[in-house]
Image (cartoon, rainbow, N blue to C red):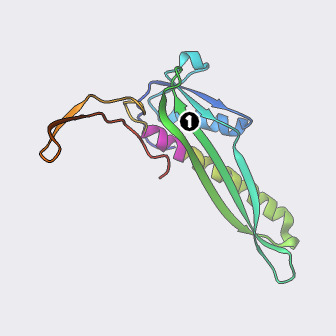
Amino acid sequence: MRGQATYAFSSVYVNTTGAPAFDTELKRALEGAGSAKVAPTAAGAQVILDIPPIGDEKDVLSLSGGGSVREYQLVMRVNFRLHDADGVEWLPQGEILIRRAYTFNETEVLARDIEEQRLLREMQSDAIAQLIRRLQAAPQTRVGHTCRSVRTISPSISPVVSRRFTLSTATSR
């Protein structure tokens, strides 16, 4: 990651399940490019980033006339949620979906396996870069907290109407 990332939080605990390479690269990216520190425990962090198991899929994209595979599509699905120790959401649950396609030739199996591994590493780096950008977009005010009442004048209903507003964010971009 290039540049300096600024976050609305000062420390984060990364809680990943079953993806040590993703965990290591994410922590390195958070430490190297941002204003927040990566905490070793959830108790020592202002926010907790939960990442359940990452889904990797390999789908057949096209077949030849003879029925053999010509093209594959790789799909990486990273779900995440950012919240504090009390469970208050800073970012609602979101998903990052990365897709890559590559051609397949039975005579070049080793080269295609190497290409597939390279694509998976690139997809992981892309997912982490997108996650960092979403963490930067986390609001200063946590999602779900109520703002102060706002008075508006509506001549057709009544002279004064009091309303409450709740902050929300979109989960997809």
Question: Is 83 displayed left or right of 19 in the figure?
Answer: left
How many marks do you count on the picture?
A: 1
Quick one: 54 or 166, which is closer to the camera? 166
Q: Position of residue 130 (x, y in %)?
A: 53, 47
Q: Position of residue 20 (x, y in %)?
A: 72, 35
Residue at left offset 37%, top offset 30%:
141
Q: Quadrant of residue 93?
A: top right
Locate residue 34, reporting x and y percent. 46, 33
Residue furthest out toward the bottom: 65
Q: Position of residue 60 (x, y in %)?
A: 77, 67
Spot the residue most to the top: 43
Is residue 134 one of those drawn in magenta?
yes
Instruction: Categorize mark 1 by other alpha carbons within 10 Å: few (<14), some (14-19), many (20+).
Output: some
As rendered, which of 61 and 88 lies closer to the eye?
88
**Tag 1: amino acid:** Arg
Q: Determine which quarter of the picture holds residue 161.
A: top left
- Secondary structure of the residue carrying numbered label 1: strand
Disc 1: which residue:
81
Left or right: where 149 falls relative to 2: left
The magenta segment is 130-137
Check residue 170 for magenta coloring: no
Q: Is residue 172 above or below residue 49?
A: below
